[in-house]
Amino acid sequence: MSHQDLTDAEVKRRMAAAARAEEQGSYREASRLYDQLGQDIQARHGRFDPRALDAFEGMARAICKAAEDEEAR
């Protein structure tokens, strides 16, 4: 993926895919998708791009939900 390929639309599409995985209870997949997106954004748009921070926040939320789910078992 080149620098130009990571458009706002592509970021939104990938965030939505991660959110769907999270909503379906696939927390490991969701955290992987959020993490990869955050890394891709940082590589192309800088370390402190707010969209990368949003992606990493999503990753943290999915990890927390996974821990809560595991604890409930």
Image: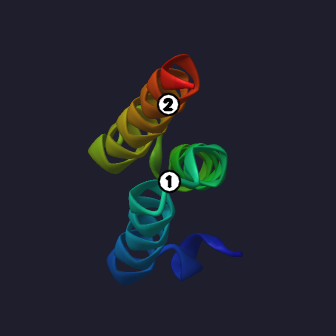
Q: Residue at x 45, y 79 (%)?
A: 10
**Circles 2 and 1: CB distance less than 8 Å?**
yes
Q: Which of 14 and 40 is in front in this view?
A: 14
Q: Which residue is drawn at 38% across and 71% down?
A: 16
Separation of residues labelled 2 and 1 (CA atoms): 9 Å
- Crowd tier of the residue under label 2, counting other residues whose Cα lies within 10 Å: few below 14, some 14–19, many 20 or above: few
What residue occupies the far front of the structure in this picture? 73
- Is residue 14 depicted above or below 49 in this figure? below
- Crowd tier of the residue under label 1, counting other residues whose Cα lies within 10 Å: few below 14, some 14–19, many 20 or above: some
Residue 23: percent from left, percent from top: 39, 60
Sequence-wise, which precedes: disc 2 or disc 1?
1
Residue receiving disc 1: 25
What residue occupies the far top of the structure in this picture? 71
Q: Is mark 1 on a helix, strand or loop?
A: loop
Residue 33: percent from left, percent from top: 60, 55
Residue type beneath disc 1: Gly
What residue occupies the far right of the structure in this picture? 1
The chosen color scheme is rainbow
Residue receiving disc 2: 69
Q: Which residue is drawn at 46% across and 38% down?
A: 62
Residue 66: percent from left, percent from top: 53, 32
Q: Which residue is drawn at 39% across and 41% down?
A: 58
Q: Residue 19's quadrant in the figure?
A: bottom left
Residue 39: percent from left, percent from top: 61, 44
- Is residue 38 depicted above or below 56 in this figure? below
Q: What element carries label 2?
A: helix
> Which mark identifies residue 8?
none
- Number of labels in the image equals 2
Q: Nearer the viewer, residue 50 or 66?
A: 66
Quadrant of the image containing the C terminus: top right
Residue type beneath disc 2: Asp
